[in-house]
Structure formats: C-alpha cells, structure tokens
Amino acid sequence: MKATLILANGAVFTGESIGSTEDVVFELVFNTSMVGYQELLTDPCYEGQGLLMTYPLIGNYGTNNEDDESDNVWVKGLVIRHLAQRGSNFRCTSTLNDYLIRHGVTGIQDIDTRSITRMLRSEGVMNACITCEESYDLQAILAKLADYKVAGAVERVTSSQISHLEGKGPKVAMVDLGEKFSVIKRLNEKHGCDLTIYPASVKAEELLSGGYEGIVLSNGPGDPSECEAIIAEVKKLYESGLPIFAMGLGHQLVALATGAKTEKLLYGHRGANHPVRDLARNCCIISTQNHGYAVKADTIDPAVAQISHVHVHDNTVEGLRYLTRPVFTIQFQPEMTSSTLKPDHQLVEFIRMIEDNKGGNRNA
C-alpha cells in the first residue's frame, strides 16, 4: 500500500506503508544508530515523536521479548529506507513489521531518508504526518501540523504507581520521568540498590521522609521548562543535601531548579556514537543520547555548579557537578557508554557518593 510523508515545510515524500495504516501526526526526529530499533521504539523519550532511522536497513534481526525498554511503544511513526522482510537472530520472535502492526505504529519505507535527514539538519526538527490515503487535502494537513505540539509528555510516560525492587545495597528512590528498564536493572541487579520507583508527581516531602540514602532523577521526554511543578519539588530535593544523580531530563530539571535555563537544539542529539569530553578526567566517552533540549552554558551560576562534560561536536553541556551539594548530573545515558573508564562509572560514582555521605555533612 502506498504511504505519504508530509513535512511541515510542505515537502512531500511518497513510499510504501509498513505497520499500521492509520494516519498519524508527530514531531519528526532522526537517530543515527545502526541497531537498537526495538529499544528506540519503546524509549519513553520519543513520546509524541516520529522516528527516522538514518541507517538504510532496519529490521534485519527482527524483534524479541527481551529488548523492550518499557511496557509501551512510544514512537508514533517510523520512517526508514528499507524494511527487512524477515528477522535473522536466535532470539527473534517476530518481524519488525508484525511488531509495528501489533503495537499500532504507522510507518513508511522506500523513501529518501538521507534527503529528509539533511533537511532536518538544516531547518531543524519539524512536525510531520504519515497518511495512507490515496487522495488527501494537503492544506488541511499542513494546518494540522502547524497546530501540533508535544506537551504534557512526562505525565503520559511516568509510572502510574509506586513500585519496589529489593536489594542489599543502598536504599534509593527514583523519580520516574520516563525511565528505561535498562537503567533500572543496572541500579538494582548490578549495583544492588534497594530501589523504589515513584511517579513524576511525587512530592519531595514523601521522598525525604522515606529514609532514602540517595535520589535518582531519570531521563524523560518533552520540554523541561514545561515541568514547573516537578522543578519545584526537585529544588526541595536539591536543598535537602541528599545525594542526587540525574540524567537526561532529570539533569535539565536540576539545572532549572538551581537557576539555569534550557534551550531547544536545532535537531538534537540522537544516536549511539556521540563523543563527550569528561573535563575532569581529560578523556572521551562514546555515549548513547536521545534528547532535543540542552542546558545553556552561559546561564549556569559558577558559584552553584561547574560544567563536567561537554559534547565534542557542538560544545553543549553534557554534565554538571554541583559545588555545595552532593549532586552530579549527565545529559547522556549512563548504562550505554564506552570509554577508558569502567563501565557504568557514573552509577558507581553515585553509589560511592552515598557511602561518603553517610554520617557526614550533607551540605559539604
């Protein structure tokens, strides 16, 4: 079946329908990863967005029952060059096309993804629509695209209730702004954290009265400046002196809570090979990233925090270390990095920070 991708700038691309045939509107972004499409489809950071994969062959190892990063598929539309018709992998349980149909994801293949990527890089991410209608009203669709906005994303992806994973290590609370299973597993299974996961609406007082030794603020979708109520609670957590480790959206919210500002990037950082310079250790980390906003470097109060990591390509802020509280934050994903340091070294540092903070001065 024919499908059409229409961009907010009026560009039209015709290809072949994959997955669901329902019309869908989204903010179109691109990811440069060669593999990991199942993890990306289930990453809550893509709530409200459509995903263009720059690698030309997608679906060659199928899908399975182990690689989902959440209980839902959050990507609204998938744009690819070519869909593999079968999956070749010993864990494969279904093809990617069957997976998309099962989860109601509309997609399109056999279009010039390179041309679209270049357009997004020069003009910025933009709203788009996939339609399978043979005849459509272009002006009506463009009007819909002009009105579309990704708003209230954190509320849609966060946990609906409190959950607990028992561990023999430090007692840690996680505020779920859109976290992935892989980070939760690393904290609980690899590092032994006794982990309680709270919805994003949790009040700081509930966390501070729970006897926790550390707080994790997770990654998540959307515009961080929208999260005014959450920022107010994060400020209370910051001022408490409890050790805090934050990543992605959590990193941005701590910055906003301490007076800094954020900005929307032209086309964001989404891929598995983003180079990040660790300034303190003078080494480079090859990181996995998925974000469209960044903390503005010139708004950070040097008496409050110092920049610990920067993106090698554009010098955007990738990490902050706070000077008067046991708090450090990163923009990239801690469970999927490669460097000369030990794997998971940010999570290891968080555990060490908790140990150092026991019985000490929390504000030191």
Image (tube, rainbow, N blue to C red):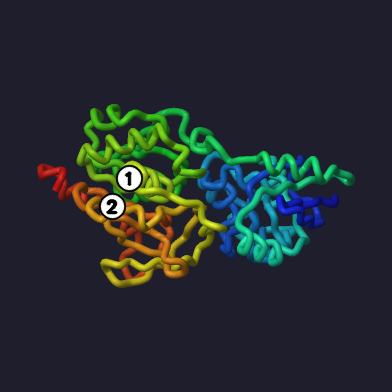
Q: What residue is rendered at 58% in x and 41% in y?
A: 150
Q: Which residue is mark 1?
A: 259
Tell me the amino acid under the disc marked 2: Asp
Up/down of 204 relative to 304, above or below: above
Nearest the viewer among 223 and 175 is 223
* x and y, in percent, of residue 347 in the image: 31, 53
Q: State the residue position of label 2.
A: 301
Task: Judge from the rendering whether residue 19 lies leftward or rightward of residue 205; answer left or right.
Answer: right
- Which of the two labelled residues, at mark 1 and mark 2, occupies the earlier sequence position? 1
Q: Residue furthest front?
A: 298
Q: Which mark is residue 237?
A: none
Q: Percent x, y for residue 148?
A: 65, 40
Whether residue 323 sits left or right of residue 313 in the image: it is left
Q: Nearer the viewer, residue 241 or 36?
A: 241
Q: Residue at x 17, y 48 (%)?
A: 355
- Residue at 72% across, 44% down: 101
Q: How many marks?
A: 2
Mark 2 packing: few (<14 Cα in 10 Å), some, or many (20+)?
A: few
Q: Estimate how packed mark 1 is, as few (under 14), some (14 to 19) or many (20 or more) residues with alpha carbons within 10 Å.
A: few
Residue 173 location (% of width, % of height):
31, 37
Q: Is residue 227 left or right of residue 72?
A: left
Between residue 131 and residue 10, name the one nearer to us.
10
User: x, y percentage for residue 179?
Assistant: 45, 43
Residue 232 vertical position relative to residue 6 in the rendered view, above or below = above
- The span from disc 1 to disc 2 (Cα, nearest Å) is 7 Å
Q: Are marks 1 and 2 in contact (CB under 8 Å)?
A: yes
Can you say whether 318 is above or below 220 in the image?
below
Above or below, comparing residue 239 to residue 269 in the picture: above
Residue 88 shows in this picture: no
Which amino acid, by three-letter code, is at mark 1? Gly
